Image (tube, grey):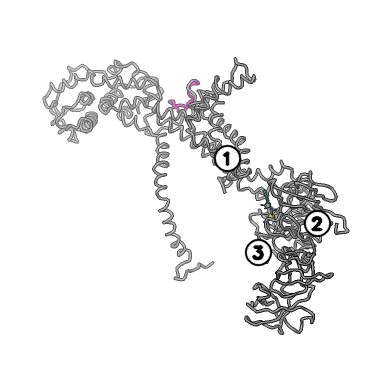
Amino acid sequence: MTEVLAADGRPLKASLNRALRRQKLRALALIAPLLIFILVSFVMPIADMLFRSVENDIVSDTLPRTVEALDAWDSASGETPDEAVFQALYTDMALATEYKSHTRLGSRLNYELTGVSSLFRKTGRRVKRFDTDVYADAFRDASPAYADAAQWAEWMDDDALRDALPRTADAYDGWAKMIVEVDNDVPAEEEPWDFVYTALYNDVMTGAEPPVAVDLSGVEPVSLREQFVEIDKDWLDPNVWQTIKIYSPKYTNGYFLNSVDLQKGPDGAEARPESERIYVVLFIRTMIMSLSIMGMCVLLGYPIAWLLANLPDRTSNLLMILVLLPFWTSLLVRTSAWKVLLQQQGVINDTLVWIGLVADGDRLQLINNQTGTIIAMTHILLPFMILPLYSVMKTIPPSYLRAAKSLGATDWTAFWRVYFPQSVPGIGAGCILVFILSIGYYITPELVGGTKGVFISNRIAYHISFSLNWGLAAALGSILLAVVLILYWVYDRIVGIDNVKLGG
Amino acid sequence: MLDAAPAFVAFERVQKSYDGENLVVKDLNLSMPKGEFLTMLGPSGSGKTTCLMMLAGFETATHGDILLDGVSINNIPPHKRGIGMVFQNYALFPHMTVAENLSFPLEVRKIGKSDREQKVKRALDMVQMGDFAGRRPAQLSGGQQQRIALARALVFEPELVLMDEPLGALDKQLRETLQFEITNLAHDLGITTVYVTHDQTEALTMSDRVAVFDDGRIQQLAPPDELYEKPQNSFVAQFIGENNTLDGVIEEIKGNTCIVKLDSGEIIDAVPVNVTKVGERTKVSIRPERVEFNRDRLHDDAHTLKAEVLEFIYMGDIFRTRLRVAGTDEFIIKTRNAPDQTRLKPGEIIEIGWLAEDCRALDA
Ligand SMILES: Nc1ncnc2c1ncn2[C@@H]1O[C@H](COP(=O)(O)OP(=O)(O)OP(=O)(O)O)[C@@H](O)[C@H]1O
Ligand SMILES: [Mg+2]
């Protein structure tokens, strides 16, 4: 086929594209505010959440030297790491204490192993009072140059010396950075702290030549390991070290494993102890309850939507107001009303007892369990089922039913074979809406669900606002998002997403 | 009963009210022999659809009986009446293919699969839509949908088919084709048809008999030619075709002629149709094509009236001339476009006349 040319000799396609581009740009400009809003308030938070669920640089940022030193340690050995690791930990902790980042790290690792938080806090308080001042004194006594801040700065500028004294250089750099960032002082005017001298001592003891000769034979070596153990015996516990080592990479699947009741062990994922498994059960419960709520909504909503679509206008308007009424009252009020209705001494139980259906002794447990959640959520989400159903049914002319009957179908056959298939898009839309809303709901389950009737979203909310374990909350949220997307995909495969109509 | 043939469909003193205050159908009496093609024609709101719905069973008569083949069907639900129906908007089920639409009435009648397929194919071929079995209604044009709706109403071989303005949504040319096809099918299959329409041409060309509805009553029930040439009252005369009316008073009645004194003073002869006594006011009706102005062709004893030509319209096959006659400006005459035909000029004064039997004195 030859290319069609426009009047000016260009290819017609190109001309058409050019003509359409302006229109497209105009359309884009119109939706730009919304686009930006969605980007900032929706896409970015979701991206941030996805990122948070795997992000884990706090360990390697706070304890860089320790993480490096732990490389050589075999976590499966069941032994406490050697002195070198404790030396690295000393430098790291001394710096972290100044930055006050050790408490944050403590909380983070506490998610994985309880007790780590207090261990870090305790250590932070005492790390400055280690007995390592004997090293500093020894150096300063040997030569006044070691007490001279300017001299230190000069030494640490000397590359040859830095190469000779790697630990010292590293500790001094960390210290100098901290002095600038935390104390706003000039390193060349401040005498280095004990841990720098300790590093220098360790360098010298491993055979390096100090800048000014010193005799350290009289100095009693201080075991840093002993120092740490003196603060807390937990530093001898290989589990603590294992946890640090397992969570040292910058990215982790730990939160996700946690979300499905697994944990990271020395040899990869392993099941959590029975007593700590909660999330899988919660996920399954969330799904099953959401499906029940959705089913209830279809059963209750379909007849109402049918009435709405087929009654004379005046009556159906009144009915529509009743359907919309819940939207005009606060969610909390409605949920609290259910508390009043459903509790054991509540209206419903009272009525049942009065009628004689239920004995006074065994009133029904309708609240603080799954029944309560299902009842209250069905009520709250019912309009989301009715409205799409109604708007689809409204477009089905009554003549179809008449046609079916005139062709010989009974009322039921006419409904089932002719009316119902045409209302399926409305059911689809309502189900998707109700299901997705309900798996993310948490206020109502929180109020009427007790412990048995809560959803996964209640756990997410808990981790966001109480335990502050955002990484885990993010992982749980991501799984929820993935589940929704998978279900959506399945729905698309089975029913077809073009088959969803919210109206017209 | 007018017809000798036994009635297949009969309405006996049927009344219908939706709101308990107004009668939408007032005292309807109608009987149709088997195989007749009857059209209900009438202005909007005259109760045509209501009658059809009562016959189909979707509305109940407030009073009176509807008989099908001699049996009262008042208490038979629609799906047991076995009446085929074509709706104005076709009402083809959008979620089924054409073939599924057609096999629906057969399925609910529990007809076997091979039988079904055969009947569906036959019905589709009958409306020349054999190639469209696999399509959805939305993929068909209006005329094609109409054909399918027709085939669906016929596929289960009902003896009575009701059609409510089935061609209302189609353009003129397609309508004419389908009018022809529908009448042919109805006659070939020998089915009894009740057809509702707004369009009088459609009613006249298709039907064996036409029932003209107005105000909840049948104003006249007659074959098309009779309806046109011998309207029973001034409503029918006005409603069917073009018509000239002159107001006047009956001067004298003798047998099947009467003398009418027009309000402008002239005296004319007419056939008394539904006037009974002298002094009664009347509307005299004359069809435009029955008016003659050429002296030579006028009967000698015909009364003539003076007329002034107001407008001459060339319409191709005919000429349409508007005259001022006996005080009215809306008097129309139609003449065939023939080589010897005079073309009247505005302002010209002529004399017009007609045969007395073409001039009918109706109710005022
Ligand atoms: N369901 C109904 N409820 C109340 N009144 C109705 C109903 N259906 C029809 N009517 C009234 O009954 C009268 C006759 O209606 P019908 O539909 O039979 O007219 P029609 O002759 O079919 O008119 P058209 O040519 O416009 O279709 C109208 O005045 C209409 O308003
Ligand atoms: Mg109608």
Q: Nearer the viewer, mark 1 or mark 2?
A: 1
Position of the C terminus of chain B by quadrant: bottom right
Residue A266 counted in the magenta span: yes
Query: What is the spatial separation of the Cα atoms under label 1 and label 2, in whole angstroms?
Result: 45 Å
The relative height of residue A24 versus residue A388 in the rendered view (above or below) is: below
* Same subunit, tags 3 and 1: no
Front residue (pair A81, A53): A53
> Residue shown at 42%/59% (left/top)?
A22
Residue B286: image x %, image y %? 73, 72
Residue A183: image x %, image y %? 20, 30
Q: Residues within 10 Å of mark 3 (few under 14, many from 20)?
A: few
Q: Which residues are magenta?
A: A262-274
Q: Residues within 10 Å of mark 2 (few under 14, many from 20)?
A: many
> Residue shown at 73%/54% (left/top)?
B216
Name the residue type under label 1: Leu
Element class at badge 1: helix
Front residue (pair B275, B295): B275
Query: What is the spatial separation of the Cα atoms under label 3 and label 1, in whole angstroms?
Result: 41 Å
Name the residue type under label 2: Thr
Residue B53: image x %, image y %? 73, 50
Question: Which numbered circle lies on residue B192?
Answer: 2
Q: Classify mark 1 as within 8 Å of ligand 1 or not, answering yes or no.
A: no
Q: Which residue is mark 1?
A: A318
Q: Which residue is mark 3?
A: B171
Residue A285 counted in the magenta span: no
Q: Quadrant of residue A110?
A: top left
Q: Chain of mark 1?
A: A
The relative height of residue A413 versus residue A223 in the rendered view (above or below) is: below
Q: Quadrant of residue A381?
A: top right
